[in-house]
Amino acid sequence: MTPTLMWTFQGMCCVFQMMKSKADEEDYWNSSKFKAFTFDDEDDEFTKLKESRQAVNSICGLVEEEEDEDEVEKVSWSGEPVGSEGISRFLSDSETGSGASASSPCVSCFLLPVSCRYLVVGQGDGVQPARAELPQDRHDAVAVSLEKFRSLQEKLLLLDEAVGVHDGNVITAVLIYLKKSLSKEVLFRELESRQTALRHFIHYLTESKEQRLLLELYRALGRTEDEALLQYKEHLRITDENKRRDFLKSCVSLPFSPEDAGHVQDHYTLLERQIIIEATDRQAETGGKVEIFQKFPRRASILNMPLITTLYYCCFYHYAETEGTYSSPANIRQTFRIAEKQYFVTALAARAKLKAWHDVDALFTSRNWLGFTRKKSPLSFSRVADILSKNNAPVQVLQEYVGLVDDVELRVALAQKYKCHFIVISTYRDLKDRQLLLGYRGKVERGSEEERKIDELLSNPQIRWKN
């Protein structure tokens, strides 16, 4: 190792060792701009497929959680904040292949955040190392040449020291250099025993969209499920729905875990069905002979919508269809194994939106073995009342379900909120509370049917009031 290289290496190790003093601070590790890669990222389409079975109650009311942008600094994959010059000016020559002159300070460099005041840095071949005074703020940086680390042993030691610093920017910068200076086979082999560096490298490849290299890495590591998931995500690039369907069909045979294999099969089946429904409904809407499409024109295509949105769509436009058709809600429920509660709340929202109160009532009606009917719901009746109210259900409809709320205080509160006066009146009567009934008399409209009902109860000698 040449004296200059030795000075450079010692200088970098000085930085690494001084920064290790921060390793016990949890926020220091978390301060890294680069998170470990996972297929559970919020923007992962595969995760959205799984979560689509959850609460989506309107075809045009999809709501996505917003990320807290204040907590994550946006950075480019050169490791610098977007808009700053930073490391890009050091990496630009080697990244673009334009080359650097012999007088350039370094050919391939990266920025080290430093927590020390002084650092020894190599300035280039034939130039003696200089002692540079640096600010104490750890977010400041110094350019360090990586080209001097030529042997495999030196490069791996550099990587291990970078991991020991617990700074994602440093780790990623070193990995970028190793990616350019080592063969894929050697790099993959060495990363296999360095899991922290491996996670950062996977995330770097993912963010830089180097899909082919990432696939090779997964194959080399024997991570068949990750390889399958990565191939599956390629469907996002396909805009033509028929080609996307065919691609998803080819993904069904990939080596997924049993759970993921089921979701991929469902995704393919759902898109296949959506293509059929979309073609049929577009023709019906254009023909102008189907009343519901004229009264409620479709706001969007059903293609590539989540499962529950598709169910809502079919409950809205195809509710009465027999189970044998692809667009039948009952057929969709059975094919995709939708839970009773999820089906119920989706159908309720769709029929309430259409003001189809007869269909709403039929959802709750059940018969026992003696033939008697009663109202039954997998949802609480307070939740049912809330859904109906949001769809502007009339009082006559609302009071039927508010009256089924078991808790007396909640029932009265809901009845007052939704102006179901007869529910309040009958509840106070059942409580035999004359004072509450007298007080409520002043809240109803004078001369109304509600006021007459209260007067009738107050004058009834057969009721034994408790006060």
Image: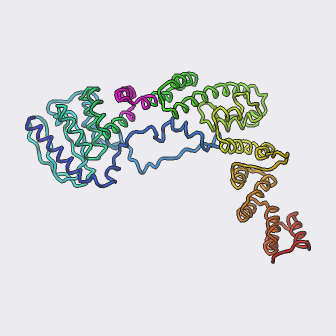
Along the line of sight, the residue nearer the viewer: 278 or 247: 247
- Please state, as top left, top right, bottom left or bottom right, where the N terminus lies in the image: top left
Q: Residue at x 36, y 35 (%)?
A: 202
Q: Residue at x 29, y 41 (%)?
A: 85
Quadrant position of residue 205:
top left
Model colouring: rainbow
Q: Residue at x 19, y 31 (%)?
A: 152
Q: Residue at x 12, y 37 (%)?
A: 5
Along the line of sight, the residue nearer the viewer: 434 or 352: 434
Q: Is residue 23 above or below residue 202?
A: below
Q: Residue 466 at x, y = what percent?
A: 81, 76
Secondary structure mostly taken by the magenta-highlighted segment of the chain: helix
Quadrant position of residue 180:
top left
In the image, the segment drawn in magenta is 205-228
- Please state, as top left, top right, bottom left or bottom right, where the C terminus lies in the image: bottom right
Q: Is residue 443 above or below residue 69?
A: below
Along the line of sight, the residue nearer the viewer: 420 or 70: 420
Q: Residue 460 at x, y = what percent?
A: 91, 71
Q: Is residue 350 above or below residue 19?
A: above
Q: Residue 99 at x, y = what percent?
A: 22, 28
Give yes or no for residue 227 being in the magenta stretch: yes
Q: Is residue 199 above or below residue 165?
A: above
Give yes or no for residue 65 being in the magenta stretch: no
Along the line of sight, the residue nearer the viewer: 278 or 154: 154
**Number of numbered discs on residues:** 0
